[in-house]
Image: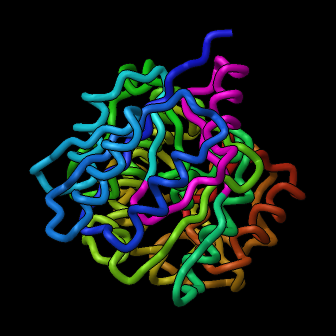
């Protein structure tokens, strides 16, 4: 069988402390039919020299420049250079396990219906952040295509540097876009909205490193507000297509934060007819349903805006026990 070329795109900016290890993790892959495209995104340290050294040792490794700052521009420059049937993401401070590409290519070769495959990660950080660790643990529970799709409005259900795309799917659904939003989340939401299918290798394929200087911590486009803004745009579209009671929804979560976030949804002509709360006889500007008094399935569509750790899963289980089906009768969106 003829092997399929994988183009690994690795943008870097001032990554001299981690770039060696990231590149070596690709060099040591058991799947050897790859090209590695290193994209220098205006580095001012020794990163470019490190990258150039690798190009002199391995003809599969290429170094290009992208002068417009930003991961989106760097990735798309690499994509324009790439020749592979499959396009793999990689970050300059992460480490891909040796079997990563072999497992992901085999999966895509055997699952024609899947547009992109990611995998589980091990969370690595100099100082563990409880919130990020919780996010990684949550993301690692989402393995099937349905789990990924059903949880798309909770948080980003796939961790970006683990992704391998079909080139044909990138051409069909579009690459990363630049804007005031997290570009990785926007791409996943856009692809799912257009009918793409994501899947995951059900084992750890990458060490995902977190640091105080990582863009997801420092960039305004990765703020909680930016996530909710882009999420709400696609959620409104999803509801238009899938909510049988559109534009009416009932929102689980009558607290201040939930009501603030719901206001974003109302800007897209979604009508909040009532809230659900754990406190009986709660008074709000809209009707408030005590959670034990919710109607049987099929009376309204519920959006859960409760984001407290553990409570999200309790709400899902409560609704399932009542006969509700996720993405048919209810959706978790926080």
Q: Residue at x 41, y 33 (%)?
A: 60
Is residue 313 among the parts visible in the rendering?
Answer: yes
Q: Which residues are magenta?
A: 91-120
Left or right side of 182 for 293: right
State the image quarter where residue 58 is shown: top left
Residue that lies at the very extreme toward the front in this rendered image: 57
Residue that lies at the very extreme toward the bottom in this rendered image: 127
Task: Pick the residue in front: 76 or 196.
Answer: 76
**Quadrant where the image shows the N terminus:** top right
Left or right side of 240 for 268: left
Locate residue 155, reporting x and y percent. 53, 60
Locate residue 133, reporting x and y percent. 62, 77
Q: Residue at x 39, y 60 (%)?
A: 92
Q: Residue at x 41, y 54 (%)?
A: 231
Left or right side of 329 for 287: left
Residue that lies at the very extreme toward the left in this rendered image: 67
What colouring method underlies this structural image? rainbow
Task: Pick the residue in front: 299 or 310.
Answer: 310
Residue that lies at the very extreme toward the top in this rendered image: 1
Locate residue 41, reporting x and y percent. 19, 55
Please count the marks in the image: 0
Q: Residue at x 78, y 45 (%)?
A: 325
Task: Pick the residue in front: 55 or 150.
Answer: 55
Left or right side of 215 for 287: right
Residue 270 highlighted magenta (yes or no) = no
| Above or below 112: residue 154 | below
Is residue 190 among the parts visible in the rendering?
Answer: no
Residue 94 highlighted magenta (yes or no) = yes
Locate residue 19, reporting x and y percent. 39, 62
**Quadrant where the image shows the C terminus:** bottom right
State the image quarter where residue 140 is shown: bottom right
| Above or below 63: residue 215 | below
């Amino acid at each position: 069988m003829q092997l399929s070329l994988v183009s690994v795109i690795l943008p870097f900016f001032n990554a001299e402390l981690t770039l060696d290890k990231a590149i070596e993790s690709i060099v040591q892959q058991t799947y050897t039919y790859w090209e590695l495209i290193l994209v220098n995104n205006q580095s001012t340290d020794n990163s470019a020299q490190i990258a150039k050294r690798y190009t002199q040792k391995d003809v599969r490794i290429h170094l290009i420049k992208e002068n417009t700052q930003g991961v989106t521009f760097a990735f798309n420059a690499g994509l324009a250079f790439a020749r592979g049937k499959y396009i793999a993401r990689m970050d300059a401070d992460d480490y891909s396990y040796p079997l990563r590409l072999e497992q992901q290519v085999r999966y895509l070769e055997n699952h024609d219906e899947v547009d992109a495959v990611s995998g589980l990660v091990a969370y690595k950080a100099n100082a563990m952040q409880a919130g990020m660790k919780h996010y990684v643990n949550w993301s690692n529970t989402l393995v099937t295509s349905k789990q990924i799709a059903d949880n798309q409005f909770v948080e980003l259900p796939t961790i970006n540097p683990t992704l391998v795309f079909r080139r044909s799917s990138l051409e069909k659904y579009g690459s990363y876009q630049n804007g005031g939003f997290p570009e990785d989340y926007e791409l996943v939401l856009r692809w799912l909205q257009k009918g793409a299918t994501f899947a995951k290798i059900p084992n750890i394929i990458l060490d995902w490193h977190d640091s105080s200087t990582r863009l997801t911590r420092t960039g305004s486009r990765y703020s909680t507000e930016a996530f909710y803004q882009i999420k709400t745009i696609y959620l409104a579209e999803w509801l238009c297509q899938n909510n049988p009671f559109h534009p009416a929804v009932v929102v689980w979560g009558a607290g201040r934060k939930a009501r603030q976030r719901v206001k974003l949804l109302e800007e897209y002509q979604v009508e909040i007819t009532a809230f659900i709360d754990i406190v009986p006889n709660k008074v709000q500007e809209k009707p408030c349903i005590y959670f034990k008094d919710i109607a049987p399935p099929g009376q309204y569509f519920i959006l859960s805006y409760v984001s407290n750790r553990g409570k999200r899963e309790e709400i899902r289980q409560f609704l399932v026990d009542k006969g509700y089906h996720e993405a048919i009768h209810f959706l978790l969106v926080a």
